[in-house]
Amino acid sequence: MDSLKLIEGFDTPKISKYINSLPSQITHVRYNAVMLTMTYEYKLQPTPEQITTIEQTLDVCRSVWNFALRQRKDWCNSRKSAINACSIQSEYIISADEPFPNYHKQAKQLTEAKNQYPQLKLVHSQVLQQTLRTLDRAWDDMKNRGFGFPRFKNKYRMRSFVFPQLGKDPIRNDSIKFPKLGWIQWRQSRPLPEGFLFKQARIVRKASGYFVMLSLQLNIDVPNPMPHGHPRGLDLGYDKFVATSDGEEIKRPRFLKTMQRKLKLLQRRLKNKQKGSNNRHKLNQKIARLHQRISDTRKDWHYKLSHHLCDGAGMIFVEDINFVSWQRGMLSKQNADAGFGQFANILEWVCFRRDVYFAKVNKDGTSQTCPNCGAYTGKKTLDIRFHHCNECGYKTTRDVAASLEIRNRGITAVGQTVVENVCGLEATGSIGHDTLVGTGRSRKSASRGVGIPHFKDIEHSEVA
């Protein structure tokens, strides 16, 4: 990475090798001034005895979660009635001077409860403490961030637990060691990066099996990429998943629609199954595997598309959109199927990994402004898919015009100008490699002919 800066005590070529050798598909990444944190996901291959222990751990964690949440809700219910009135519903009588059951109080009660409930001793103590911490974090997010109320969990909703620390040398080529579980074989689909420290491990139960998510940290200063190279604006939408300022339009894949018929048939069969029966459980597993297949296909496509968009680009600009609001509209199903929010997060990570500058710009009026002259063209209904400016006569498709405006706003934000440079297109201040928006001349697509095999629905629009 060109813009890599290291803190004292680290070898630049060695760390650069670590960063450049990272796999393209990483579950999560968090980076700041002095720390790089990544999460690698691997599939476990536990024995039947280890599966029984994992399921037992999940069941105990679920009991601890539900009891702690019930305790917090009872404390709140005992204080929601007025002083001169009684609650219509029966509530626990809790003393007025009883403090709120926060994490520290519940963690102390958990230690005392092990003497009364021996099954709590079967699970590692730190795993149960992390369950209480997760509940405490969800409670704080409800109050501070406006999230929903924490929910009680049945045996299907509690799907993971965390080991906050592993023992000494917990990794071997064919297995990984966990407290209370021992050595579990795993499928090491990709090598672990050298120099990183193991911070924690989360075991997750999915429809296709059990997985481990290893959190790795490296004490290194990794600054964000600086603006450089060819700028590219992206416009997301329902008809075309993404339209670029280079004239490329990629249709939105229907991940759910392709599997919806089979999913619908399985859901119909589920209606006739008796609750709690083995047949209902097996059918639920089939439905869950189908949902996971849809989710994995969508995520894989997002990664491939992100790398494709980074090819030949030095700067990428997108709209600053609250995709949660999109989910609440009448096109919520289509929005969830497209996964715009996940794509935006993946694109930001891929840009960081490939040293491409990533930034968000103001979303207001991108389809109502002419990217050629900056004139206001008025609001357009969704059925109008073509841009025509009455001021300068500039014509192009609506999505490409919006992506050009997004690119212009991004370049203006980083301190460059959107004008043609008389000294040449490669000089400072020029936009593009062939010609500029604003000259009235045709512009060749910078990414034309760079299509990748797994994109079957790629279109190029002539900008004239």
Image (tube, rainbow, N blue to C red):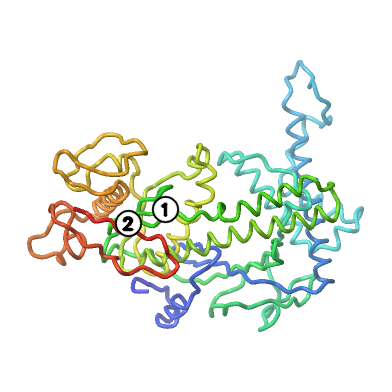
Residue at image position (41%, 65%) is 352
Farthest residue in the left direction?
422
How many marks on residues?
Answer: 2
Say which of 1 and 95 sits in front. Answer: 1
Say which of 66 and 253 sits in front. Answer: 253
Residue at image position (66%, 52%) is 263
Q: Secondary structure at mark 2?
A: strand
Give the residue at mark 2. 244
The correct choice, above or below, for 313 with respect to 254 in the image is below
Three-letter residue code for mark 2: Thr
Corner quadrant of residue 359:
bottom left
Q: Position of residue 6 (x, y in %)?
A: 41, 74
Say which of 316 and 88 sits in front. Answer: 316
Give the residue at mark 1. 241
Q: Position of residue 267 (x, y in %)?
A: 71, 48
Q: Disc 1 versus disc 2: distance between alpha carbons?
A: 10 Å
**Do callouts 1 and 2 mark residues in contact (Cβ within 8 Å)?**
no
Q: Is residue 47 left or right of residue 347?
A: right
Residue at image position (56%, 55%) is 258
The correct choice, above or below, for 298 with respect to 387 in the image is below
Q: Position of residue 132 (x, y in %)?
A: 72, 51
Three-letter residue code for mark 1: Phe
Corner quadrant of residue 94:
top right
Q: Secondary structure at mark 1?
A: strand
Q: Is residue 116 left or right of residue 406?
A: right
